[in-house]
Image (cartoon, rainbow, N blue to C red):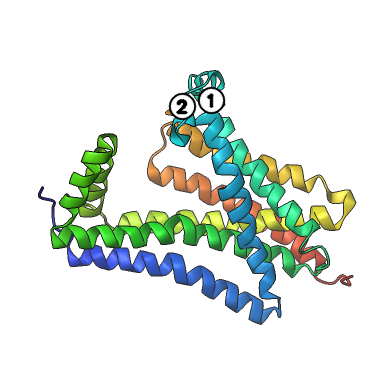
Amino acid sequence: MEFSKIENSRMGLLVSGAILFTVVPLIIAIVWTIKKKEKFTSVLAGAATFLLFALILEKPLQNILVFPTMMGLSEHAAAKFINARPVLWALIVGLFPGVFEETGRLVAFKTVLKNRKNRETGISHGIGHGGFEVMFVLGIAYIQYISYASMINAGTFGDMIAQVAAQAPEQTAQGYAIAAQLAAFSAGDLAINVVERIFAFMFHTGASILVFYACRDKKKFWLYPLAILLHTVMDSVAGLQMAGVIALSPVMLEVVVAVFGSAVFFGAYFLLYKKDAGKEQV
């Protein structure tokens, strides 16, 4: 099997992406904790929240309900009902991360971080949550892309595809798609990924501020369901795009993410975090 060689310029973009999505979140966390004299464990608590509530709890349960075949299960009646209704499908795809991730923040602030009342804790948790998501979603993906690109250039990628074809023929098309994607990878593709992750990171930081204040002040507990609603709406837009209900260009989809992420972050930052600046911390 012959595949188009991956040019050095494209390899450079892939390496740049891997560095951006693995090193930069860590640098942000280190600089923030040093500058604000924050405990790094608050950042680690945010990372653990994403790991436990998004990856270990949310994804498997979502797959069992909506994508049972991915779990090696037969498609049940509920999955058939949901998958036959694109709008409902998009809503559920958005609701799962909204409920699980925001509840994860709530649990973290009520347990391991319950004694940390300083306002910076909310941002520290958000940096850990959003930063780990960047590293897991795109950092690992770009490292895999570099590995695949190296195999293509070495002429061994075809051997891997042949092995996949022998064991799981239905996954062969995915291998060819990856090769085509890498051969056409551009600076624009990297830029879209960077923009998306910046505003997703901002969203997670803003949502963490919301839930932090929901836990800190009983009168503001409504901020917790608000965070769930905002998270659900943002992810449901992507779900509607995936389901074909709406047809936004990649740029327009990123504009939606940018507006939403910015609104949540700056709203939480100025209306809660900034206004709290002069108050005595308990």
Q: Percent position (x, y) of residue 136?
A: 48, 58
Q: Which amino acid does label 1 sit on?
A: Val
- Could you tell me if residue 203 is visible in this image? no
**Residue closer to the observer: 221 or 70:** 70
Q: Residues within 10 Å of mark 2 (few under 14, many from 20)?
A: few
Label 1 sits on a secondary structure element that is: helix
Looking at this view, name the residue that lies furthest to the left.
2
> Which residue is at a point 77% across and 67% down the rendered structure image?
119
**Residue closer to the observer: 107 or 88:** 107
Q: Percent position (x, y) of residue 273?
A: 75, 63
Q: How far apart are marks 1 and 2 (CA)?
A: 7 Å
Q: Any mark on residue 245, and which? A: 2
> Which residue is at a point 67% across and 41% down the rendered structure image?
99
Q: In this view, does 152 lie to the left or right of 60?
A: left
- Could you tell me if residue 280 is visible in this image? yes
Q: Any mark on residue 157, and which? A: none
> Which residue is at a point 24% across and 54% down the rendered structure image?
182
Q: Percent position (x, y) of residue 184?
A: 22, 52
Above or below 85: residue 116: below
> Which residue is at a point 45% across and 67% down the rendered structure image?
22
Q: Which quadrant of the rendered structure holds the C terminus?
A: bottom right
Q: How crowded is mark 1: few (under 14 residues within 10 Å), some or many (20 or more)?
A: some
Residues at discs 1 and 2 in contact (Cβ within 8 Å): yes
Q: In this view, does 95 lie to the left or right of 276?
A: left
Label 2 sits on a secondary structure element that is: loop
Above or below 203: residue 240: above
Q: What residue type is labelled 2?
A: Val
**Residue closer to the observer: 131 or 155:** 155
Q: Percent position (x, y) of residue 222?
A: 81, 44
Q: Name the residue under label 1.
A: 87
Earlier sequence position, callout 1 versus callout 2: 1
